[in-house]
Amino acid sequence: MLNCLITGGAGFIGSHLAEELIAESQRVTVIDDLSTGCRENLASVWSHPRFRFVEGSVFDRHLIAELLAEADEVYHLAAVVGVARVAHSAIQTIKTNLHGTLVLLEELARTAAGRQVRLLLPSSSEVYGNNPKPLWHEDDCLMFGPTTSRRWCYGLAKAVDEMLALAYWREMGLSVVVVRLFNVSGPRQSGKHGMVLPRLVEAALSGGPLTVHDDGQQVRCFVHVADVVPAMIALMRHPEAVGSVFNIGSDQPVTILELAREVAALIDPGLRVEFRQFAAQYGSNFEECTRRVPDLSRLRQTIGFAPRHTLQDIIRDVIEWTKAHAAPQQ
């Protein structure tokens, strides 16, 4: 039985990870400041004897040291999430993603001396910036825009997180695995911070219109959280994954306009799609990435990854969850 620590574990991905680890008969401790996560996400494990919740911050060095002293595995999911929060809270984005990771690494290096504690660091497809390649491989160059564009603060901070974690692996001997997540979606994901699929579903269930930005031709690949979580756990425990970076996602591309039409087809085909410029919502200096498709060959070769859920499965699951958790009409 392993002691698993999840920072940011009351969030969308973290709560699914907690459930999976409990189902594996592991002990799970979640630390979360509840800035974007919520207790309700952990309802299914809240009373389980092998689950513990700690309300607190990754900035709290003393608390983090206490929790790490007991941990065998650490999943560092605490981060600012959502394009809306990134666009309007650059200071908090950079501070949370950089300072929180540095505190965790420093305390892990200190408290894990003589023990083999594994760390999985979830990063993001945002680190590739605006790389023009049609398929993004883990060893590709990262190509960001100017620092005057708020868009890149999240990806730049995540890229530095990766470099920090890998430096602690090389110089301090920490067992570190980095994963870059591509548009993970599924039940419990909220649209209030700009996540595109739940935002479209919420709009469709409210009668529309479905808003897409610019011309809707931005290309993305959506993967179900139920496929991502087992991949994260498998990489955490795979000896050949240590010191490496892995894309996790789907490599089946879809435009945002096509996604909106898929959502409408499952709820109400008569719903209208409305186009809006990015500047109207995020400001004039906000840049958009036109295409994000991951190369998954490294992931397949290492753990035999193959997503079980189609895009339609993901959309249906988001629709069902959103309906079940909609606020009652007054």
Image (cartoon, rainbow, N blue to C red):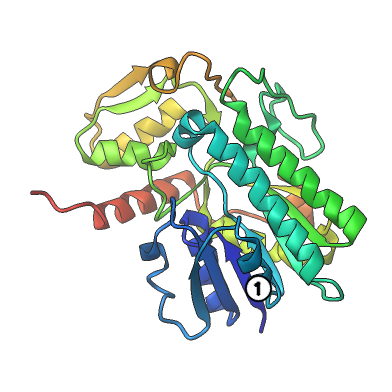
List the single residue furthest toward the right: 171
Residue 285: where, in percent of width, then height? 53, 15
Residue 175: where, in percent of width, then height? 81, 63
Q: Is residue 292 visible?
A: no
Horizontal side of residue 213 vs 141, given as left or right: left
Label 1: few (<14), some or many (≥20) within 10 Å? few
Which three-letter amino acid code belongs to the residue tagged 1? Glu
Q: Who's the residue at 52% across and 24% down the image?
A: 218
Horizontal side of residue 49 vs 158, given as left or right: left
- The one of 132 and 303 positioned closer to us in this rendering: 132
Badge 1 element: helix
Horizontal side of residue 282 vs 184, given as left or right: left
Q: Who's the residue at 25% across and 24% down the image?
A: 272
- The one of 41 and 308 positioned closer to us in this rendering: 41
List the single residue furthest toward the top: 284
Residue 248: where, in percent of width, then height? 65, 48
Above-or-below relation of 143 to 154: above
Q: Who's the residue at 66% across and 84% down the image?
A: 1
